[in-house]
Amino acid sequence: MPFLSPIPACLLLLPFLFPSGTVANVDGDGDGKPAPAPVQKPADATKDKDASPAKKAAEALGDAAKLKRTAAGKKDEEKLEILTKAASAYEQVARDFVTDVETAAEANFRAGEIWRTVKRNEDARRCFTGAANCSAAPEWSARGWLELGHISRRLRKLEEAFKTYGKVLEVAPQQRSQCVDALTWQGRVLIDQKQETEGQALLLSIGARFPDYPVDDIRNVDDVAVDWIRAGRVDEATKLVLDCVDRHMRPADGKEPSEAVRRALDHMKARELLAASPKEK
């Protein structure tokens, strides 16, 4: 009876199949084919793939902000160069994340702030317009319209400024803080246009319309009262100021006035003028 080897015949043939003395790297399928080497992805590509769009947007904004901060302490040409690069970086973020309305709007606004700082008004206007037109990002839209209004006002285009401030209330009425600012600037623009009665009436109406912004109301009342004192309307100014103090020092819903309110009342210029002697006024 022939001798039966306990070693499978296929293993006995390996030296003839692989004369180099090495055994093939067989994959897990058992088909005898060499297993492919694992594909190594670049670390950055893996990171980009794993990061969420929101995280990428936040990182991009953070990088631009970090670049802007490096301008602190620098002077003249060096500072200008850094700020210019930072503004360009923000604009690139706006382009890269154009479908992310919130990110694009903020990036445009931040770029506009820098261009305004370095007095490149046309670039500032372009970027603020980009933010203003993002009505789906109401905070940045409102702030963009405010800045566009400021640009027109500084150029003494007062009618255009008045209308531009009005866009804040039109497109972002839910942004109450910016609405208060817009109405305040509209009142001041009217005064600049020698429409004092209309402008002062507008300033005095804001407090009733936005009672949750008492500090703004105090400042607006103060501005009007100072104008009245200087125009000789002392009695009217006195009543206006006393009513304002009483209104804001009175506890509301069982709560005492905040420190900010107290400070605003204490720093009213009109109260200082009224307490001064006639010659000092």
Image (cartoon, rainbow, N blue to C red):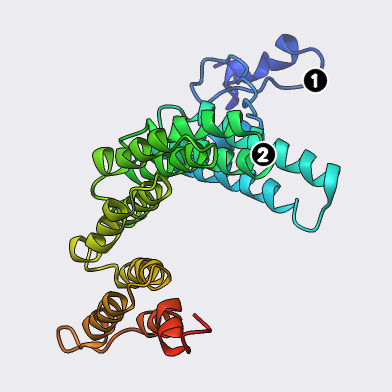
- Residue receiving disc 2: 119
User: Secondary structure beneath disc 2?
Assistant: loop
In the rendered image of this protein, does residue 173 appear above or below residue 264?
above
Residue type (three-letter) at the residue carrying disc 1 = Gly
Give 192 or 163, whichever is nearer the viewer: 192
Q: Can the viewer see residue 281 in this picture?
A: yes
Displayed quadrant of residue 206:
bottom left
Tag of residue 21 = 1
In the rendered image of this protein, does residue 20 appear above or below residue 110?
above
**Left or right of 242: which side holds 192?**
right
What separation in Å lies between label 1 and label 2 (alpha carbons)? Answer: 76 Å
User: Secondary structure beneath disc 1?
Assistant: loop
Estimate the x, y position of residue 91 in percent, counting from the top left.
58, 31
Displayed quadrant of residue 261:
bottom left
Looking at the image, which residue sits at the far left?
Answer: 253
Estimate the x, y position of residue 26 in percent, counting from the top left.
60, 22
In the rendered image of this protein, does residue 79 appear above or below residue 244?
above
Estimate the x, y position of residue 141 in percent, counting from the top left.
37, 39
Residue type (three-letter) at the residue carrying disc 2 = Lys
